Image (cartoon, grey):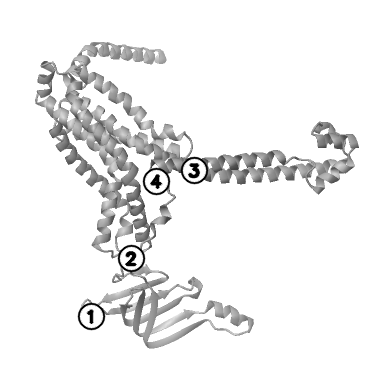
Amino acid sequence: MLKQFLGLFVLTFMICIFILLMQFVWMHVKDLVGKGVGIGVLSEFFVYAVISVVPLALPLAILLASLMTFGNLGEKVELTAMKAAGVSLFRIMRPLIIAVATISVGAFFFSNYVLPRSQVKLWTLIFSLRQKSPELDIPEGEFYDGIHGINIYVRHKDKQTGALKDMMIYDLSKGFNNATVMVADSGRVFFSEDNKYLLLVLYSGESFENLNQKQQNATKTRERVPYRRESFKEKHMLIDFDTEFSRYDESILHDQHVSKNVRQLVHSIDSVDDVAHKRSREQSEQLIEGKYFGRDRKEGLILDEVTADNAQAIKDGEFNPDSLLASLNVALHRRSLVIAIDKARQMRDQIDYNAMLLDDSQRYIRKHEMELHRKFTLAFACLIFFFIGAPLGAIIRKGGLGVPVVISVVMFVIYYIIDNTGYKMAREGLWPVWAGLWLSSAVLLPIGIFLTYKAATDSALFRPEVWYKYLEKITPYWTKLVNIIKNKLKLVKLSKKT
């Protein structure tokens, strides 16, 4: 059994990796196409991408492999023979439980040590690819905008000589109002030796430069210079176009949650949490100290106008605001209201600013807590999917790639939807992080326990003949219910007519 399970597990794991890898590549295809990078860079990208999709492929492979293993045993009546010999289902599952537990432990260490390093290298490589200039490939009959600030139109390309015919160039590097338009009968493109500059040589053409800025300056001196026209036999343009692939430094992701293991995540959470608590305590003290009276010069002027008893009571904090406000004259009454409104607005602005500062810290903590829980949920999901797939295969007793694949895909889609929902709830702060990240496990764990119990008790939960018999039993009652409903509807129609 262990040999059969491991063989199926490796096969299904490779299939899942391939499917998820294609999805990942499709999401980042715009970062790869047209960049002219070498095979080494592409190979490195695919290796890191494969490592990044392992957390999703591993539970699905365990579910499918366990479902096919026990489905094959049930279809060949081997499972029934073992049970008839007195071997319980848990004893049959024991070697596979040990194997899956070992895989789960390995999955935790993989997500704790291997995955953070690969994520840093993968995203550093993706950011570097996004900044690389695209490979120069000027098409025929359409504008090419792969060069920053310049659009090139070529009507025809000579594939033998590399000459470009009937060219039109829009130079927008100085802004749209100061654009330069050039037309040429032909031209050629060359790269500098260091591949950081593009030399565009134009032959037999004209250039039209919009002198909008110069026109504005000329207006002050009562001169009109709308544009400049230049005819040339040969014109050279040197353009910044770095075709070399330069990598970002991996240190740009050193403080990101994806680059840390459990120990580093816990350390970062504790450090930022202490800073957030200290900042929150300081902000609370500032708000408490920011009273409405006795703070600035304007408020002091009002205190000078009231009686000495009231002023002393205000300073001591023992006063009735209503009686104090009623004791003021009309001018002081209005002035006190204006000061109170200004003070309230200042406090509101201070509270909004403090909330923004605290929100950044809380978002940082949430991301790190989510990554911390994710390392444990991956290992636990492997166990849950095994205890769903193994008893489900023993119940349905169907092997091969037909029914098991359909059931596995349905279960994995349910898991993915629940897990993604909990992840978004935790990310937005609507739920606690532990509740959002463990939601899928909390939903699927009872399903696994229920299916294991049904398989251990030889339940006929998914046998079609059992459902047929049940439908035959309830069919007479269903027919009677339908007839009763029809008679009631007829009576209602007759009563309406009468």
Callout 4: SS = loop
Observer-side mark, 3 or 4, equals 4
Callout 2: SS = loop
Residue at screen point 82% across, 36% down:
314
In the image, which disc is placed on residue 363?
A: 3
Q: CA distance from mark 4 to mark 2?
A: 27 Å
Disc 3, disc 2: CB below 8 Å? Answer: no
Observer-side mark, 4 or 1, equals 4
Q: Is residue 112 left or right of residue 332?
A: left
Observer-side mark, 2 or 1, equals 2
Residue extending farthest to the right is: 307
Disc 2, disc 1: CB below 8 Å? Answer: no
Q: Which residue is mark 4?
A: 260
Q: CA distance from mark 3 to mark 4?
A: 16 Å
In the rendered image, which quarter contains the C terminus?
A: top left
Circle 3: residue type? Arg
- Residue 492: image quadrant is top left
Q: Which residue is mark 2?
A: 245
Circle 1: residue type? Thr
Residue at screen point 32% across, 26% down:
445
Q: Which residue is mark 1?
A: 161
